[in-house]
Amino acid sequence: MATPEAAAAAAVPTKAAPVNAIIPADVVGMNAQALDEDLAALGFENVIYNSDTGKTVLLLSNWTVTSIDNPGVTQATNKAVVVHVTK
């Protein structure tokens, strides 16, 4: 029979290793909302949208992608992906 300590140790979830995905490279000119959906489908959890004009990005469908940091690079999906956009 297992001790209470052993049962408690077995119940502690282990932290899963980060999953990796490739940051898309061919994104210039895409609608930011469409890219956001693509990045989510790849598993990216933290996407940061930076406006080329300094404005706050609220409604992604109103923005066009001008670049993405580290295109074509394999990266952990829990790390930030930075997308640059303009109106």
Image: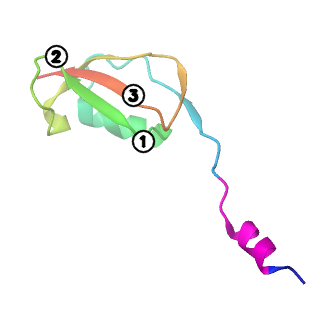
Number of residue marks: 3
Distance in Å between CA atoms under marks 2 and 1: 22 Å
Amino acid type shown at disc 2: Asp
Residue drawn at point x = 52 percent, y = 18 percent: 73
Position of 57 relative to 24 (above/below): below
Q: Earlier in the sequence, mark 2 or mark 1?
A: 1
Q: Mark 3 falls on what kind of element?
A: strand
Q: Is residue 43 or residue 15 the one in the foreground?
A: 15
Furthest residue toward right: 1
On residue 52, the disc is 2
Amino acid type shown at disc 3: Val
Residue range (magenta): 4-14
Q: Which residue is mark 3?
A: 81
Residue drawn at point x = 47 percent, y = 24 percent: 23
Q: Is residue 14 or residue 82 the one in the foreground?
A: 14
Q: Mark 2 falls on what kind of element?
A: loop
Dividing the picture into quadrants, the one containing residue 83 is top left
Q: Position of residue 79 (x, y in %)?
A: 47, 33
Q: Which residue is mark 1?
A: 45
